């Protein structure tokens, strides 16, 4: 169990996919560039390649991101956050019910 104070430490915001492409040499990894509001962009590497084999179809979609995780290297690329997904034996992307500004805070 974590406290509400622990949860509040997570910077969860809605990002909009600007670009998405498969990572060369990986069946699973996709390199995403997100608009996270206020003119800021983030590169996030996600293991969605099997579930979403045509990543370009994700461009323009919005989804929740955790933005204050320490960066991590995956296949030589820096991932600057994490996408939140449902897990049903494969990742299922989550989306706002309607369009919101990039960078909107998730509480």
Image (tube, rainbow, N blue to C red):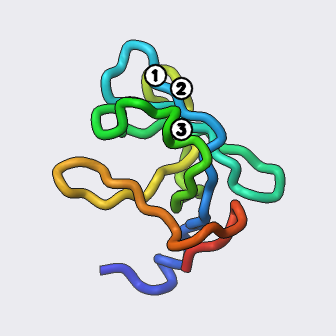
Label 2 environment density (alpha carbons within 10 Å; few <14, some 14–19, many ≥20): some
Q: Position of residue 78 (x, y in %)?
A: 56, 32
What numbered label is drawn on residue 77? 2
Dot 2 and dot 1 residues touching (CB under 8 Å)? yes
Q: Nearer the viewer, residue 52 or 85?
A: 52
Helix, strand or loop at mark 1: loop
For the residues labelled 2 and 1, the Cα–Cα distance comes to: 9 Å
For the residues labelled 3 and 1, the Cα–Cα distance comes to: 12 Å
Which badge, 2 or 1, comes first in the chain's sequence? 1
Which badge, 3 or 1, comes first in the chain's sequence? 1
**In the image, what residue occupies the spot 82% across and 58% down?**
38
Number of marks drawn: 3
Helix, strand or loop at mark 2: strand
Q: Is residue 2 above or below residue 34?
A: below
Judged left or right of residue 24, residue 71 is: right
Q: Residue furthest top?
A: 25
**In the image, what residue occupies the spot 45% across and 24% down?**
22
Label 3 environment density (alpha carbons within 10 Å; few <14, some 14–19, many ≥20): many
Judged left or right of residue 27, residue 57 is: right
What numbered label is drawn on residue 43? none
Q: Position of residue 32 (x, y in %)?
A: 55, 37
What numbered label is drawn on residue 23? 1
User: Which marked residue is nearer to the observer: mark 2 or mark 1?
Assistant: 1
For the residues labelled 3 and 2, the Cα–Cα distance comes to: 6 Å
**In the image, what residue occupies the spot 32% across and 29% down?**
28
Give the position of the N terminus as an image quadrant.
Answer: bottom left
Give the residue number, with chain letter if any, for mark 3. Answer: 79
Dot 3 and dot 2 residues touching (CB under 8 Å)? yes
Judged left or right of residue 30, residue 19 is: right
Q: Position of residue 43 (x, y in %)?
A: 61, 38
**In the image, what residue occupies the spot 37% across and 57% down?**
85
């Amino acid at each position: 169990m974590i406290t509400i104070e622990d949860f509040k430490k997570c910077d969860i915001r809605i990002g909009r996919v600007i670009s998405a492409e498969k990572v060369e040499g990986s069946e699973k990894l996709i390199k995403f560039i997100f608009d996270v509001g206020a003119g800021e962009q983030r590169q996030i590497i996600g293991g969605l390649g099997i579930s979403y084999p045509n990543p370009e179809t994700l461009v323009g979609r919005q989804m929740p991101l955790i933005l204050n995780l320490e960066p991590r290297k995956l296949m030589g690329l820096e991932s600057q956050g994490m996408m939140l997904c449902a897990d049903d034996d494969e990742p299922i992307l989550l989306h706002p019910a309607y369009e919101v500004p990039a960078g909107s805070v998730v509480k």
